[in-house]
Image (tube, grey):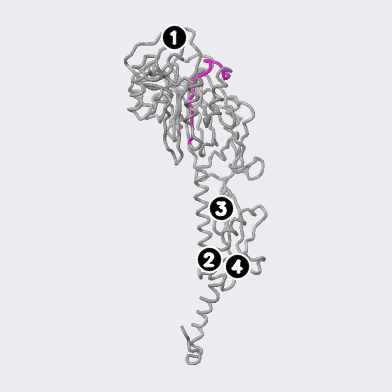
Amino acid sequence: MRIPFASHGPAALPALLYLLISGAVVSCSSRFFVEHPEDLAAEASVLSARLAGSRTPGGGRFRAAEVPAEADIVLRLSASWSGESGSEGEGLILFHTPFVPAADIGRDALSPAGMYKILRKAVPFEDCISGAEAIHRVEDLESASLVLRVDGKSLDEPDYPLVREVRAGLEVRGIRGRWAESGVRKLLAALGEEDRIASGAFRRILWISAAGDLMTGRGIDKRLRDGGPEAVFDPGVLRSLRGSDLALANLEGALTLRGSAARKTYTFRSDPSAASSLADAGFDALLLANNHSLDWGPAGLADTLEALAGAGIAGVGAGRDLGEASRPFRIEIKGQSVAVFGAARFPRERSGWDGARTAAAAGRPGILWLDEAGLDRLRASFRDDVLDIVLFHGGTEWSKEPDPRVRGIVFGLAEAGADIVLGSHPHVVQGLEWHRGRPILWSLGNLVFPGMDGTPGGEAGLLVRAGFQGTRLLYLDPVPLVLLPDGVREAAVDSR
């Protein structure tokens, strides 16, 4: 396009200026400078790398200035905590970095009392930002550390307060700066959105509720049939079960009206209709690898599996043959693959009844017995990218400490790749221990078990809410329970 300047005179000046601006100015590089406090050096480096070389709206490129005076756009970084009053500052939010207080409990076994004291600790937001409570990035935590809630909030809650928000304010200078401003804002918005999505995915927590021995005989099945789950489980327990992504327990006894009773001290069975009420309570999978699933023989076990499947509950650790008993319940939750396995190994009863004889085999129904062959079957099924949960039934009844005879067996599960082991059978609550970075809850005690009145520790239980990010345990919320003759309720606990 030619503009005959002489013929148009002063009228040609606007067109000439337009060409100068749109061509000579916009196509040139625009310079930026990032001002930041020392503690935001890492964020400033990321921002500078993102901007450098990006194109301006006119086709030029952004490049870094050596000093602020040379810059067409100055970006000033500042940070605040999302939970601070008046934290809404100026500028676009570029980075959302969650921090957490944590408890390092990996060196020694933690007793039930220690679990309540440490893991139920109330951590105020003010203590975190004042330095009274040490805070960390999650990726910097030791493998045997557990995250604590802040003001009662966990990472996955929208109003979690301990998120450091880094903002960028813009100072635009000159023609180049004004023409480049829209491009810079788009780049900053894209960077902020990418980090928001990434940090949101990072805070995605998969919640699992797990409890101990659940026995629906001795009238519990009738209460479930007549009054539903609310007639057995108190509101707090139901909130935990129904509010989790996955709810687990150990089912003691057969859901059957037929079969022959085994020759042993106690045999339990209840109406198969109880399965639908257990599903309504929130249960997704129940352990059948225990000393009561064959109380009424193979027919009773078959009825139990059928009743649970009809209610949408998986029975794990027992089956019509060894293949089925070894097969986990697999599910994908929040983009994470999860596998729930069941296995058992417990002492012979005083009556002479030996649980090892109920082990499943090729063509024979039974439970997955955790001997070396059973461990090998589990080891072959564990996957690094899958959250592998093992429900284990074993140890010594009424013992407050893990049975030395099963410690090596359970440690073998952790070494083989189990991401968490959840124990049952002792009927009393035992503690938490880490082995090679994998958590083991030795015994969760009882959940629902009429007839425990007056037993040493049998009237107490533990429900845990375990929060995972991928295969890493972050949260463990212990909920103490009190058993009643006709159900269970949450117990008050002094966590000071």
The residue carrying pointer 4 sits among few (fewer than 14), some (14 to 19) or many (20 or more) residues within 10 Å by Cα, namely many
Return the residue at label 3.
Answer: 95
Name which quarter of the figure residue 361 lies in: top left
Return the residue at label 2.
Answer: 55
Q: Which residues are magenta?
A: 386-403
Which comes before the other along the chain, label 4 or label 2? 4
Marks counted in the figure total: 4
Q: Position of residue 423 (x, y in %)?
A: 51, 23
Please tell me which residue lies in front, 271 or 354: 354
Whole-number angstrom distance, CA of label 2 to CA of label 1: 79 Å
Return the residue at label 4.
Answer: 31
Please check the rendered image and state whether residue 398 is part of the magenta-colored stretch, yes or no: yes
Whole-number angstrom distance, CA of label 3 to CA of label 2: 22 Å
Return the residue at label 1.
Answer: 265
Which comes before the other along the chain, label 1 or label 3? 3
Whole-number angstrom distance, CA of label 4 to CA of label 1: 84 Å
Label 1 sits on a secondary structure element that is loop
